[in-house]
Amino acid sequence: MKAKIKVAIQGKQASFHHIVAQQYFGNKLSLVHCDTFDISVQEVLKENADLAVMAIENSIAGSIIPNYALIDQNNLKIVGEYGLSIHHNFMALPGQTIHDINEVHSHPMALLQCKNFFQNHPNILMVESEDTAEEAFRISKEQIKGTGAIASKEAAQIYNLNILAPSIQTIKNNITRFVIVQKKGNLVPESKINKAALKFTLDHQRGSLAAVLNVMSDCQLNLTKIQSLPVIETPGKYAFFVDVTFEDFTHYDKAKKLIAIMASKFKILGEYSQHKR
């Protein structure tokens, strides 16, 4: 019998990372629960987990910058991605109404995505915490009344909470993109690769970024994401993180060779198969 894949996630059972891991790996999954993204990365580096699932961007809140840095600084390789439609539900112990709730606890990203809902309920204090499902679990375990959580419907089911208001995110079409990372790369067959995550740093020259973007266009790459981060050791200089998709691997291969020549620093963060919803 083949051993299950050990996957590190930030959060408890019924967290959005747990849902993604289940949908991506199916019944081949063995979860390694971690309190933070830093710990999940360390579990992969120590080989206590084969891979990790990490949220990288949200269609409402934008890029999750610290996770870009974690992947880059620890030389992890992106080997897959998954886009999950996020539905935030406001829940509490049974027998209460929304008027009985004084506080709501959840991850800062979830609170941000539901800000408009709670502006209509100014009596409810928004409190940041480490994880969505963690708060649902805590409320259930300690039987805390007067406090609500924002989490998945799966969390309400598992922890026996009542959903007071479903799908309260401000923008209903709310997608979070997750990446699958591991310690070593090059395990995705070339025939299946149609997306790549790249990082490059350019010298201070006018038009240098435009020149790189022209190479991408000339080589028929579709730029789906660009994110700049400051180079800490060189104030005023920026590294660019980009995602590109392509139909022909040879076009991509030509582009990355040219960009490697043009950039002062160049790094492949991952080559993998694009997730299509």
Image (spheres, rainbow, N blue to C red):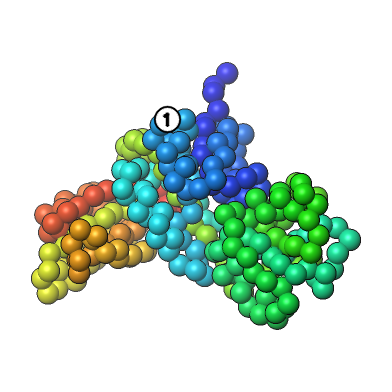
Number of numbered callouts drawn: 1
- Is disc 1 placed on a helix, strand or loop? loop
Question: In front: 236, or 18?
Answer: 236
Which quadrant, please, contains the N terminus? top right
Question: In front: 128, or 276?
Answer: 128
Residue that carries the numbered disc 1 in the rendered image: 47
Residue ID at (42%, 30%): 47
Residue occupying the far right of the picture: 95
Question: In front: 35, or 211?
Answer: 35
Q: Is residue 104 above or below residue 37?
A: below
Q: Position of residue 234 (x, y in %)?
A: 18, 62
Q: Position of residue 45 (x, y in %)?
A: 39, 35
Q: Is residue 247 left or right of residue 61?
A: left
Residue ID at (35%, 54%): 69
Residue occupying the far top of the picture: 1
**Amino acid of disc 1:** Glu
Dot 1 alpha-carbon crowd within 10 angstroms: few under 14, some 14 to 19, many 20 or more: few
Q: Position of residue 185 (x, y in %)?
A: 33, 38
Q: Quadrant of residue 209?
A: bottom left
